Amino acid sequence: MPLGSLKSPELNLYSNQSSLVKTISRTSTSDMNRTSCIFLRTRRFCCEFILRENYKTNQGKRNFRTYRNKMALTEQIPFSKDFLFRQFFDPISSTYTYLLADVTDKQAVLIDPVIEWAERDATIIKELDLKLIYALNTHMHADHVTGTGKLKELLPNCQSAISRTSGAKADLLLDPEDRVKFGRHELLVCPTPGHTEGCVTYVCREQGIAFTGDTLLIRGCGRTDFQGGSPQILYNSVHSVIFTLPENFRLYPAHDYSGRTVTSVAEERNYNPRLTKSLDEFVSIMENLNLPYPKMIDKAVPANRVCGIYELMDKEEKD
């Protein structure tokens, strides 16, 4: 009997696990996709059972691996009602900036702001009656000047934050496993070096999301040929940190150049054209990209070492 023809009461007939497994093993992937959502929990159990028991039907195992991946794409955790999320875009550098807030007590954080858009960000924060407590960077950027310093001028209670290993100055220097709290929510600081030495990924486990900076992009990754970058280290960072998150976690990168806004762990583990390769293949790809010299690097890196405000650098030199 095909799975799609089962009615809810008939599932009781399949109290024997092996009988249910055999039925579903013979079910095509397309039939699984057409099956009513009423069987979602049953199908999830069977998927896990087959893989765990190494069920000896090759087609069944292939079907369920496909199904498991599709489940990860569709069963993403919805944001809680007290969690605010906004995604902003800079068309010049193709940079994404993320605003996160606790709706109840109004505390907010901003990830990877761009200096040219600092006033826009501050205006939105004020309009939403939020209190920006941290302006965070995932790393010391080379393609734009960070807006953290400017935001500190516009919103005096805001503090800048970046990883300690980045070599940049900030009010808060973040170490591995630190937690950046805003209201009842928090971001876990996970080192993911490779694009630069100081890259981190911010993970919000309760909401099922992570902000990967330039370490992992949608169907790509950041370059590894400057600022202490290393293809071997980046590959290990992605596979040991980001790809070990739950498959349904949404991933938000610092950039996209094709209009895409979000991906997931399952998507990138299956479809990233670089990071699905072996380590040796990945290193070969990265070492032969022959990318041009970043046009903003000579301006952006010195500014980003001091929170994105040249005046701060001038003041330090005078002191």
Image (tube, rainbow, N blue to C red):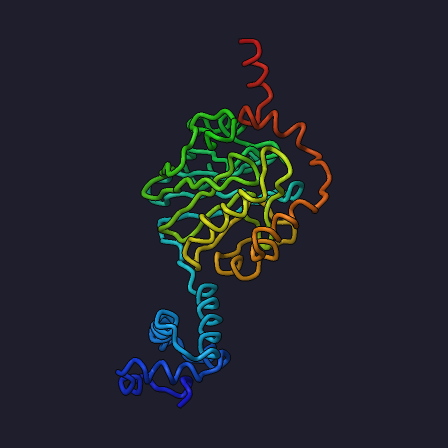
Q: Which residue is drawn at 51% across and 38% down?
A: 199
From the viewer's perspective, tell me whether residue 253 is left or right of residue 190. right
| Image position, residue 89 (x, y; %) | 59, 45
| Image position, residue 178 (x, y; %) | 37, 36
Nearest the viewer among 281 and 74 is 281
Nearest the viewer among 177 and 213 is 177
Q: How many marks?
A: 0
Q: Residue at x 36, y 38 (%)?
A: 181
Nearest the viewer among 172 and 148 is 172
Residue 188, located in which quarter of the rendered image? top left
| Image position, residue 314 (x, y; %) | 59, 15
Residue furthest top in the image: 319
Residue 187, located in which quarter of the rendered image? top left
| Image position, residue 310 (x, y; %) | 60, 21
Nearest the viewer among 105 and 114 is 114
Is 52 rendered above or below residue 261?
A: below
Residue furthest bottom in the image: 1
Q: Quadrant of the N terminus?
A: bottom left
Is 144 rendered above or below residue 318?
A: below
Is 109 rendered above or below residue 24?
A: above
